[in-house]
Image (cartoon, grey):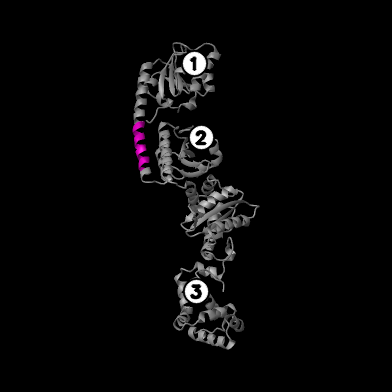
């Protein structure tokens, strides 16, 4: 066994022979026994360090109830594991004052109806404790080697946290200084309830200087540092019905926290951004088992969901940077300063995702307008900020994010002088731009305009421009001729040549519509005088 508890000691034959009975502190029998101390002193606390199981015949116990209470208080204050009193010499039964005092201090009180040899108890328990300590040392070496191996191969922080969860069998959470749960891992299937009301619960657990139990839930907490400064902490949550936190769990969490500190020392990992990206991608592809799991994960990163309007934004930025600053890093730094609650992360190499949480009564447009203005001012006009419909349920974010992605696909870089784009900005040029890689669109353009483009290339003519102006003028030949600077007769001659080459009747509205689509598609494909982006005809 990795450590002994009071309950374990009571089951040993050497103690069981004394017919032990628990008179107080029944719910504290899981306390770890660090040592056994036999004493008949009235003030043994001055010789104790905590964790000892105190054995006594009760001979020195005072008769005065006040002094007896003081005796129990001194033991409880030093943190002994429990008090064992052998009956028969001083007491025939445990005095009520002693029982009451132990109950008030939640101190386990065990009475032995029969006498036992205390020397045998100490020898047996100490041998088991030493064996457990030796096993703990061997276990510590194995754990140290595991985390060293992970460190040397540059493992991700998720791997360190998962290893700690697997080794302890308990949920483990890595959080930053503002109590956002950056990573949460369990030994088995994900347990969404681990993160219920996480920031509030986390603030009730003080930060210790080293791995130690903390807070009303008995969390095991270990600090994680970054170049000598506190970055956050690693937290192990004990199972409600499981064994208490012991030396092995403490050792494992310390090793994991040290490995995470080294990981931060050997690089500049953006763990917060990784966490945001992970949640955004999980929302985009809806990888959650339930709405509750999604809500808890988002709220654990500081994003309020209930009673808020959630606005997904996709920023297409290509390889744009401003010095060493990326779009994602810039937004992550600037949005908290402006008081905007949001998740910010990378959706892909060239796209940043942004999920805004705004008060339902507030307008989202000014916020997105400000974001677009800031990004264009910092990174240039080539960025596209696409906004999906605002939703009130986290489960609706997936559809809204996908619509924002479709908008970003359609708008293309540097088009339309707007700081952000919504679905209503998608016209025919934008629709065709989003389909620019579709072979069917390319084949359609070739079928409709191929002979005309070839004729221009072979003869150095500009019939495609003539056709474009004619289509822009909605078939009005006089207006189109004026725009291209030709006489009506010369313009009519060009139209007849175009009709002959394409085999189409330009007086037909249906044929003009087909050609209009083809010319627009050719423009967005970047061919024959067009551009590589949507252009309104």
Q: Earlier in the sequence, mark 2 or mark 1?
A: 1
Q: Secondary structure at mark 1?
A: loop
Disc 1 crowd rating (10 Å Cα; few below 14, some 14-19, many 20+) is some
Q: Is-magenta flag for residue 4?
A: no
Q: Which of the pair 262/405 is nearer the observer?
A: 262
Label 2 close to label 1 by CB (< 8 Å) = no
Q: Earlier in the sequence, mark 1 or mark 3?
A: 1
Q: Which mark is residue 371?
A: none
Q: Are marks 2 and 3 in contact (CB under 8 Å)?
A: no
Residue under circle 2?
Answer: 207
Distance between mark 2 and mark 3 Cα atoms: 63 Å
Mark 1 sits on what residue? Answer: 94
Q: Position of residue 283 (x, y in %)?
A: 51, 53
Main SS of the magenta part reads helix
Q: Residue 205 appears at what percent x and percent y?
A: 53, 35
The disc at residue 522 is 3
Residue drawn at x 57%, y 50% as measured from the top left: 335
Residue under the point 50% across and 86% down: 500
Residue 324, how many percent across, how many down? 48, 52
* Residue lying farthest to the front in this orientation: 323
Residue 391: where, in percent of width, then height? 59, 55
Q: What residue range appears in magenta?
A: 136-149
Circle 1 or circle 3, nearest the eye: 3
Seen from the viewer's position, the closer of residues 57 and 78 is 78
Residue 61 in view: yes
Q: Residue furthest right?
A: 361
The local secondary structure at tag 2 comes to: loop
Q: CA distance from mark 2 to mark 1?
A: 41 Å
């Amino acid at each position: 066994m990795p450590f002994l508890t009071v309950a374990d000691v009571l089951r040993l034959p050497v103690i069981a022979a004394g017919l032990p009975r628990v008179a107080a502190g029944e719910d504290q029998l899981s306390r770890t026994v660090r040592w056994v101390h036999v004493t008949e002193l009235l003030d043994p606390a001055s010789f104790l360090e905590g964790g000892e199981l105190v054995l006594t015949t009760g001979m020195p116990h005072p008769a005065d109830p006040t002094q007896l209470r003081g005796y129990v208080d001194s033991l409880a204050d030093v943190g002994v594991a429990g008090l064992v009193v052998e009956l028969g010499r001083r007491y025939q039964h445990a005095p009520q004052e002693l029982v009451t005092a132990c109950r008030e201090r939640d101190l386990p009180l065990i009475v032995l109806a029969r006498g036992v040899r205390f020397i045998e108890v100490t020898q047996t328990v100490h041998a088991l404790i030493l064996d457990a300590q030796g096993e703990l040392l061997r276990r510590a070496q194995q754990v140290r080697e595991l985390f060293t191996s992970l460190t040397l191969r540059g493992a991700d922080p998720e791997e360190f946290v998962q290893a700690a969860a697997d080794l302890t069998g308990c949920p483990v959470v890595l959080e930053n200084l503002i109590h956002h749960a950056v990573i949460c891992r369990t030994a088995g299937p994900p347990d969404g309830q681990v993160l219920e009301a996480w920031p509030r619960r986390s603030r009730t657990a003080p930060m210790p200087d080293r791995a130690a139990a903390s807070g009303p839930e008995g969390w095991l907490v270990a600090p994680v540092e970054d170049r000598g400064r506190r970055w956050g902490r690693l937290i192990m949550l004990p199972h409600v019905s499981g064994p208490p936190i012991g030396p092995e769990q403490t050792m494992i969490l310390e090793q994991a926290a040290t490995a995470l500190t080294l990981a931060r020392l050997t690089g500049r990992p953006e763990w917060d951004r990784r966490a945001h990206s992970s949640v955004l991608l999980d929302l985009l592809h809806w990888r959650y088992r339930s709405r509750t799991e999604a809500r808890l994960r988002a709220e654990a990163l500081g994003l309020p969901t209930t009673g808020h309007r959630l606005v997904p934004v996709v920023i297409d930025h290509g390889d744009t940077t401003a010095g060493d600053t990326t779009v994602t890093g810039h937004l992550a730094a600037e949005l908290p300063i402006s008081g905007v609650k949001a998740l910010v992360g990378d959706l892909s190499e060239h796209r940043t995702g942004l999920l805004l949480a705004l008060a339902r009564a507030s307008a989202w447009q000014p916020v997105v307008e400000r974001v677009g203005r800031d990004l264009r001012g910092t990174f240039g006009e080539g960025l596209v900020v696409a906004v999906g419909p605002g939703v009130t349920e986290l489960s609706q974010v997936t559809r809204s994010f996908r619509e924002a992605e479709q908008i970003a696909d359609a708008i293309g870089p540097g088009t339309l002088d707007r700081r952000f784009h919504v679905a209503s900005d998608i016209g025919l040029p934008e629709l065709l731009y989003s389909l620019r890689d579709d072979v069917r669109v390319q084949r359609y353009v070739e079928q409709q305009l191929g002979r005309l483009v070839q004729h221009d290339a072979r003869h150095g003519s500009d019939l495609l421009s003539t056709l474009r102006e004619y289509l822009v003028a909605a078939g009005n030949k006089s207006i189109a001729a004026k725009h291209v600077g030709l006489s009506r007769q010369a313009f009519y001659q060009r139209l007849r040549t175009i009709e002959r080459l394409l085999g189409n009747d330009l007086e037909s509205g249906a044929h003009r519509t087909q050609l209009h689509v083809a010319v627009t598609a050719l423009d967005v494909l970047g061919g024959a005088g067009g551009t590589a982006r949507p252009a309104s005809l």
